[in-house]
Image (tube, rainbow, N blue to C red):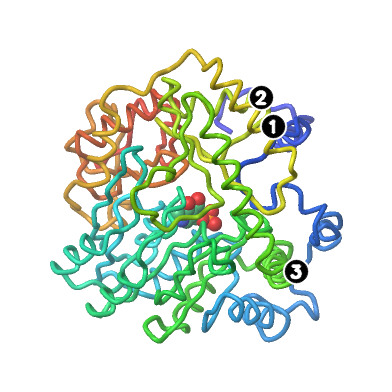
């Protein structure tokens, strides 16, 4: 609270009531968390119902996340066995905390890490924690403006220029595309670097042949996964896997020990145990049924006027997550954000949207009536599209420009964050050195990185996102009229 603000009314419950209002509207949830608020009907029900009673700490018998010798050690070992890792750690700070720990374990202030332009902002957090310098490889956007996964040629070209300790790959991407992890792993290894996979959206991979295999199975040295996104773990719960000898498990353990709270929530930790148990117990069948359901749903959605489903017309069937449907709404003449708002007013909440697409996250535990609700809502929006806005001219070119090129890295992000800063109008920010990592959110991939010279394309792109109705994170000024730069 700022000095001079009116005294707040302490009888209010702004957050708790906002959550209750959302739940009471009973929307069809095509978004994370993966349990979709319905774990109560599945094997996790008793857990949800008794949450307060089960919220415990390091009392006798419950082990210690920071020195596990009992139940937590066993639960982590079971997860490692099911996901094919040599070692797995539980994270109560999502894949975000996991990536930070892996970066710290892989590289120090004298090192460089190779990462995709448009990496999730948690990778930038990894640079802050490790002090390492970033080097980027470009990301190509497809005709819908969606990032394609890392191309081995682009990674090879970047690796040819300077030695790096680790290479990061985002696979699957936020939109469900999968990289050739095997090719990337052998490239990284030939250059003496570890391959770290940001598999936040792929905890369900490798369990059923309709889905891509896991990145660990393809040769990655480490992976983070957010089972809260696609499995039934609770929001914030994630795991960190390591395999092979390129990343020292001892260092990963030390990093997680320092970076995680000393009061980890046992509800989160146990939800990881339960999510693993559910996958082992239910086996691949629910995922096979989900892939079939997704295919039928995609065909029905693509039959609506003005609506396409990404991937339907791919010349080569690129590996992708079948549980993620990306609607191409260009034919409706308005932005994906406008369509997502229109769907929301009809009781259907999408995972995310952008200038041209709307992303729907399907889960094996969704009730059947949600698909009917979705189809009815999409049909209504297709028949009477919202009035606007239209995607602004030039958005795709700008999006491509920020994915493929970047400004000079004047200072490592960790150093830039400590420097004095000042606020300038966004319109005048080009040429200054960024003090903030500003990302459209979702997907949370920074367009400016601390310590990097801001390019005019980045300014123009952020301007279009803000005008188009997208949210951004990382800017002190949420209106984006101004941004922080180094003084
Ligand atoms: C690609 C990617 N990586 C990492 C993360 C961070 O995951 P978490 O929310 O579990 O910290 C996200 C979150 O949205 C993500 O989309």
Residue at image x 49%, y 69%? 214
**Foreground disc of the pair 2, 3:** 2
* Separation of residues labelled 1 and 2 (CA atoms): 8 Å
Q: Quadrant of the C terminus?
A: top left
Tell me the quarter of the picture where residue 465 sits. Answer: top left
Residue 75, image x, y percentages? 68, 78
51 w.r.t. 1: above or below: below
Residue to which mark 3 is pinned: 57
Residue to which mark 2 is pinned: 346
* Separation of residues labelled 3 and 1 (CA atoms): 41 Å
Residue to which mark 1 is pinned: 373
Q: Secondary structure at mark 2?
A: loop
Residue at image x 79%, y 60%? 44
Tell me: 208 left or right of 252.
right
275 w.r.t. 141: above or below: below
| Of the pair 13 and 210, the residue shown nearer to us | 210
Q: Residues within 10 Å of mark 3 (few under 14, many from 20)?
A: some
Residue at image x 78%, y 32%? 24
| Of the pair 127 and 166, the residue shown nearer to us | 166
Q: Earlier in the sequence, mark 3 or mark 1?
A: 3
Residue 90, image x, y percentages? 60, 70
């Amino acid at each position: 609270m700022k000095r001079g603000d009116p005294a707040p009314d302490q009888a209010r419950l702004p957050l708790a009531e906002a959550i209750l209002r959302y739940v009471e509207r009973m929307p069809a949830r095509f978004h994370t968390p993966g349990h979709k608020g319905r774990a109560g009907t599945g094997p996790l029900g008793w857990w949800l119902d008794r949450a307060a009673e089960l919220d415990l700490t390091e009392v006798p018998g419950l082990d210690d996340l920071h020195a596990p010798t009992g139940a937590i050690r066993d639960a982590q070992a079971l997860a490692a066995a099911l996901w094919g890792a040599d070692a797995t750690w539980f994270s109560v700070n999502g894949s975000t905390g996991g990536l930070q720990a892996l970066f710290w374990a892989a590289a120090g202030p004298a090192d460089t890490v190779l990462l995709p332009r448009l990496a999730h902002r948690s990778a930038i957090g990894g640079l802050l924690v490790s002090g390492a310098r970033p080097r980027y490889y470009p990301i190509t956007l497809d005709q819908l403006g969606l990032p394609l996964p890392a191309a081995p040629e682009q990674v090879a070209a970047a690796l040819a220029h300077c030695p790096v300790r680790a290479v990061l790959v985002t696979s699957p991407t936020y939109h469900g595309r999968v990289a050739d992890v095997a090719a990337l792993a052998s490239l990284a290894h030939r250059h003496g670097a570890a391959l770290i996979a940001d598999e936040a959206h792929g905890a369900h991979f490798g369990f059923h042949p309709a889905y891509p295999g896991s990145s660990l199975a393809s040769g990655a040295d480490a992976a983070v996964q957010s089972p809260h996104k696609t499995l039934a773990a609770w929001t914030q719960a994630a795991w960190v896997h390591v395999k092979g000898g390129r990343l020292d498990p001892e260092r990963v353990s030390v990093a997680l020990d320092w970076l995680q709270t000393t009061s980890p929530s046992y509800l989160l930790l146990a939800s990881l145990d339960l999510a693993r148990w559910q996958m082992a117990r239910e086996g691949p069948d629910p995922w096979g049924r989900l892939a079939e359901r997704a295919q039928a749903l995609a065909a029905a959605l693509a039959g609506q006027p003005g609506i396409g489903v990404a991937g339907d017309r791919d010349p080569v069937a690129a590996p992708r997550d079948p549980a993620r449907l990306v609607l191409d709404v260009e034919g409706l003449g308005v932005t994906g954000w406008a369509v997502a708002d229109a769907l929301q007013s009809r009781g259907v909440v999408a995972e995310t949207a952008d200038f041209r697409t709307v992303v729907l996250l399907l889960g094996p535990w969704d009730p059947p009536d949600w698909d009917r609700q979705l189809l009815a809502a999409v049909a209504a929006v297709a028949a009477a599209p919202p009035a606007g806005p239209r995607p602004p001219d030039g958005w795709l070119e700008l999006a491509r420009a920020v994915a493929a090129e970047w400004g000079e890295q004047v200072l490592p992000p960790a150093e830039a964050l400590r420097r004095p800063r000042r606020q300038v109008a966004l319109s005048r920010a080009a040429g200054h050195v960024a003090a903030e990592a500003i990302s459209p959110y979702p997907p949370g991939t920074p367009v400016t990185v601390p310590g990097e010279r801001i390019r005019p394309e980045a300014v123009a792109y952020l301007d279009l996102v803000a005008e188009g109705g997208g949210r951004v994170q990382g800017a002190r000024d949420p209106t984006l009229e101004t941004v922080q730069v180094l003084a």
